[in-house]
Image: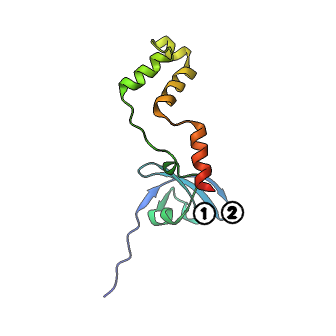
Amino acid sequence: MEEKPKKKKLIPVRVIYNHGKTSLVEWEANGLHRAFIPVDQAQEGKVDAEVLETGMPYGLPWEKYIKPTTVTPEQLANALRVAGIWTKEDLWNNPQSVMGAIQGVVGIHLGSLVEAVEKKEA
């Protein structure tokens, strides 16, 4: 009995760049991903899902470094008010204060993210 060839699941990709025999490609599948794959696999703008799975991932796995927090609308609203953001004009005129308030409530800031990455990568 003859086995049928396995049907390929083709995923649309965007080629970021080619270098020698390698392509860096980007695709959307439950989030944005990038990986290095053989250049000959990325010719038609679609790549076999198995090739993408076995490609060499590009970038850091941010999901491993970020611990989600639960923030209520009331907590964010209060943080904005404490930062002096009460009106639409305040929002447009003080973007740094807005970002600081959001960052304070969410609890993720650059320093802790860098520290988490350094610990995992060491």
- Quick one: 119 or 28, which is closer to the camera? 119
- Quick one: 121 or 11, which is closer to the camera? 121
The quarter of the rendered structure image containing the N terminus is bottom left
- Decide: marks 1, 2 in contact (CB < 8 A)? yes
* Label 2: few (<14), some (14–19) or many (≥20) C-alpha neighbours in 10 Å: few
Q: Position of residue 79 (x, y in %)?
A: 45, 22
Residue 122 tag number: none
Q: Position of residue 85 (x, y in %)?
A: 48, 15
Picture quadrant where residue 41 is located: bottom right
* Picture residue at 61% right of the left edge, 38% below the top: 111
Q: In the rendered view, would you say 38 is above or below 108?
A: below
The figure's colour scheme reads rainbow
Q: Which residue is mark 2?
A: 20
3D distance between C-alphas at marks 1 and 2? 8 Å
Q: Secondary structure at mark 2?
A: loop
Query: Tag 2 or tag 1, which sits nearer the N-term?
Result: 2
Q: In the rendered view, would you say 14 is above or below 86?
A: below
- Quick one: 112 or 48, which is closer to the camera? 112
Q: Which residue is mark 1?
A: 39
Q: Name, please, the residue furthest toward the bottom.
A: 1
Q: Name, please, the residue furthest toward the left.
A: 1
Picture quadrant where residue 18 is located: bottom right
Q: Position of residue 31 (x, y in %)?
A: 44, 48
* Picture residue at 45% right of the left edge, 16% below the top: 81
The quarter of the rendered structure image containing the C terminus is bottom right
* Label 1: few (<14), some (14–19) or many (≥20) C-alpha neighbours in 10 Å: some
- Amino acid found under the numbered disc labelled 2: Gly
- Amino acid found under the numbered disc labelled 1: Val
Q: Secondary structure at mark 1?
A: helix
